[in-house]
Image (cartoon, rainbow, N blue to C red):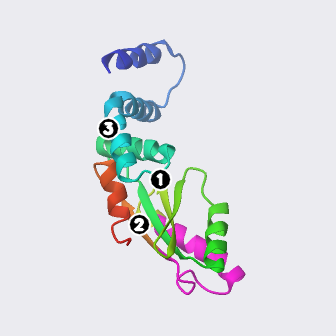
Amino acid sequence: MSERLNTVKRARAGLRGYQNPILTDVKHVATAVLDRDNSIASRDLVAVQRAHPNCPMDFIDVLARLVRVRNAVGIESSLVLMSFPMTEQGREVLAEIRRTQRTLDMEWCFERGDRLHRLVLMPITGSRAVGGYFKRIDAQLQPRFDRTLGEMGVTARQTSLVDDALRCIDLALAELP
């Protein structure tokens, strides 16, 4: 890590002109956090993959990085679990929501029991922003389906990231059969 910090310091010293010190410090912290200890990421990847073998590796990788950012600098991110009835309409609603996914978000879609599930990783998104996301989706889908998400049997709940990637997923999926 000290080698990386020295490289960053040398690069900063060699730059000419105006630099926004806040942006430079944020980039520096993020780089240090993400490059700090690859063994943590590897450990998280292995643990989550063992417990949830169908979870996409890209999803686990980004989740592990966001957990490290949260632990290092306190930036909140969220996991949102949406559950849909396993009906034709449930599949249509899921497909429509997937088409309108935010660029930063990552998803893991799977079936368990008699429901379809979509676990969404929402980087740098707290509970207030997740509430706005739900309202936007409901307002967008209500004219097409003539009912709210709740009336169509769709449930959703938000979980803030905690100190460990596996624990994050386990908390998000805790109420599933």
- First in sequence, mark 3 or 2: give its number: 3
Number of the label disc, if any, that sits on residue 54: 1
Q: Position of residue 109 (x, y in %)?
A: 54, 60
The alpha-carbon separation of the residues under discs 2 and 1 comes to 21 Å
Q: Are marks 2 and 1 in contact (CB under 8 Å)?
A: no
* Magenta segment boundaries in residue numbering: 130-155
Mark 2 element type? strand
Within the magenta stretch, is there residue 149?
yes
Q: Amino acid at mark 2?
A: Gln
Number of the label disc, if any, that sits on residue 158: 2
The alpha-carbon separation of the residues under discs 3 and 2 comes to 25 Å
- Label 3, on which residue? 43
In this rendering, the answer to whether 140 lies above or below 59 is below
Residue toward you, 115 or 167: 115
In the rendered structure, the answer to whether residue 58 lies left or right of residue 162 reads right
Rendering quarter of residue 17: top right
Q: Quadrant of the C terminus?
A: bottom left
